[in-house]
Amino acid sequence: MSKARMPWKAVIGGSIGNMVEWYDWFVYSSFAIYFAGSFFPEGDDTAKLLNTAAIFAVGFFMRPLGGWLLGRYADRKGRKSALTLTVTLMSASALLIAVAPTYDSVGYIGAVVLVVARLLQGLSVGGEYAASATYLTEATPRGRRGFASSFQYVSMTAGQLVGLLLQIILQNTMSQEALDSYGWRVPFVVGAVAAAVVFYLRRSLLETEAYDEEEREVTPHDRGTIKELLAHKKEALLVIALTMGGTVAYYTYTTYLTKYLSNSAGLAKETATLVSFCALFVFMCLQPLAGRLSDRIGRRPLLITFGIGSMVGTVPLMTALGGVQGFAGALTLALIGLVIVTGYTSINAVVKAELFPTNVRALGVALPYAIANALFGGTAQYVALWFKDSGIESGFFWYVSGCAAVSLVVYLTMRETRDVALSRTEQASAEVPARV
């Protein structure tokens, strides 16, 4: 491993903003059980959750557009500029949800406001993932990139944990009626304010050496274009395929877990929330360890381990979770699932960034990843609830296993990316093929 010092200011600066982005993104899902009735009053609980899950999916379908627009922006204007823009959009979307009117006051107009807010969130997150992944990867010396980029999922998970912690606090300080009436708005107000603060923090970040080098040597019209991306079609398709299994498994064991434990296993909402919080905290701590391991042994071994574990383990794990009786059993099973998922989450950002040259790196990460998430990640909750509503809930478990199997084939056949140079300066320091 390289002895170069870790650029902690860049890692922390990028991670804090990413944390707020994903807090706002996931808090919609974690509080849906409380505000579903405010916008979709008719039908049973599953029908209401289906409606809110559909709007959740709408945000994912905007991610390819956000990935294209903001990925292009990051390749043309810089990683730092893209990071400040994405967090601005996220602040605006959180504020919209916080003030959205209910069905009782204006009918379905409130649901329309939710859709608009989710569209903004989709644009923002579509660009945030790539800008953050590219920034953390480029700002870190070779030999430490896996460790540094793992903080993307540390910050993503931290954002979700903050949302869950706030949910636990509200559950213990407010009545059920108050939460259903107005308490669910509190986390969105917090998210809007936090994003505004991060906007100023991100303005102090330095641009990466790889981008500065590219900006000096390549004219703007050659950077971040679809034409340039099409010159790397194989890598783009690789990103979609390797993301497929990982994103479905990730959303199954994170955002959908609380609903599954509450709606299917029959655990109290408070118990299900506490299980998710504890499991995600351990999951967050595992990310840097796995990222550091990938710097030593390579990216492919971790991806292959995830692929096999998810393909073989999802059906028995989810079946057992559906019949779990208490906190300890649910936590143990959830942790097993999240340990498996760590093989993907800890390094997927750096792997994608290492596949592309600098002039199209952000777009190359953003657009294919966003497409995969729109098709598989964003629909995971809806597909799960659809199977449940149809009386064949176990069909979803096989669906997750099938997606993992497809990605496993990719992991087994792709090349190792750990030692790729990301800039000409980095290439000059060692005789390694450069991705510049």
Image (tube, rainbow, N blue to C red):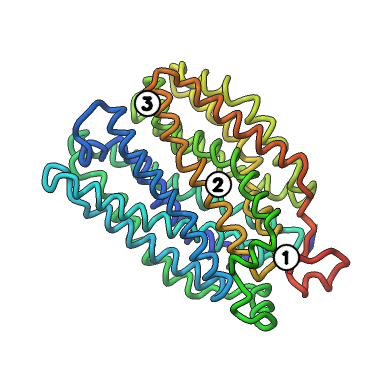
Residue 329 visible, this orientation: no
Crowding near pointer 3: few (<14 within 10 Å), some, many (20+)? some
* Towards the viewer: 154 or 234: 234
> Pointer 1: what residue?
141
* Towards the viewer: 368 or 15: 368
Q: Residue at x 18, y 50 (%)?
A: 101
The image quadrant where one finds the C terminus is bottom right
Vertical side of 180 occupied by 145: above or below: below
Amino acid type at circle 3 is Ser
Q: Residue at x 50, y 75 (%)?
A: 204
* Towards the viewer: 291 or 65: 65
Label ID, residue 262: 3
Amino acid type at circle 1 is Pro
Q: Position of residue 420 (x, y in %)?
A: 78, 60
Label ID, residue 239: none
Marks 2/3 in contact by CB < 8 Å: the verdict is: no
The secondary element bearing badge 1 is classed as loop
Q: Residue at x 34, y 30 (%)?
A: 270
Q: Position of residue 182 (x, y in %)?
A: 20, 45
Q: Quadrant of residue 248?
A: top right
> Pointer 2: what residue?
372
Vertical side of 52 occupied by 4: above or below: below
The secondary element bearing badge 3 is classed as helix
Q: Nearer the viewer, mark 1 or mark 2?
A: 2
Among numbered discs 1 and 2, the one appearing first in the sequence: 1
